[in-house]
Amino acid sequence: MPVREPVNYLNVSYGIKSWLLTVDHKRIALLYLASITVMFAIGGIFATLIRLELLTPPGDMVQSETYNKLFTMHGVVMVFFFLIPSIPATLGNFLIPIMIGAKDLAFPRINLLS
């Protein structure tokens, strides 16, 4: 008789549709984690471009208006799309229901939409 692996939130069902339409708080937290990782990479690219501009004294890589846009977008992406959602969205969705003994979130579909 073959041994079956236990069913958990990672292997309950496969496919992109099962991930994007899930109501499981752990899967929602992993989706948040993936999106803030992408935002961290985008903010890092902006920071790299800023530092490359400051590498030489004449600053001839981008124009001054583009530099100002890069600086602003780096701040916006890192604060509003990485720092603020990282702790409450990722850790809150994953750990809080487990810590309080709840089976799931109160409104999982609204949480998934955000």
Image (cartoon, rainbow, N blue to C red):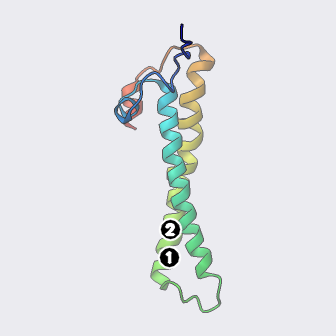
> Does residue 38 lie above or below 15 as drawn?
below
- Numbered label attached to residue 42: none
Which element is circle 1 on? helix
Which of the 4 quarters of the picture holds residue 75? bottom right
Q: Do the residues bearing badges 1 and 2 touch, measured as CB atoms within 8 Å?
A: yes
Residue 40 spot, x, y in % from top left: 55, 55
Q: Residues within 10 Å of mark 2 (few under 14, many from 20)?
A: few
Per the image, the residue denoted by label 1 is: 68
Residue 78 spot, x, y in % from top left: 55, 56
Residue under the image location 62 percent in, 75 percent down: 51
Residue 35 spot, x, y in % from top left: 48, 46
* Callout 2 amino acid: Thr
* Callout 1 amino acid: Asn
Per the image, the residue denoted by label 2 is: 72
Residue under the image location 60 percent in, 39 percent down: 87
> Does residue 33 lie above or below 63 as drawn?
above
Which of the 4 quarters of the picture holds residue 111? top left
What is the spatial separation of the Cα atoms under label 1 and label 2, in whole angstroms?
A: 6 Å
Q: Residues within 10 Å of mark 1 (few under 14, many from 20)?
A: few
Question: Where the N terminus falls, by quadrant?
Answer: top right
Please give the count of numbered marks on the rendered protein.
2
Question: Where the C terminus falls, by quadrant?
Answer: top left
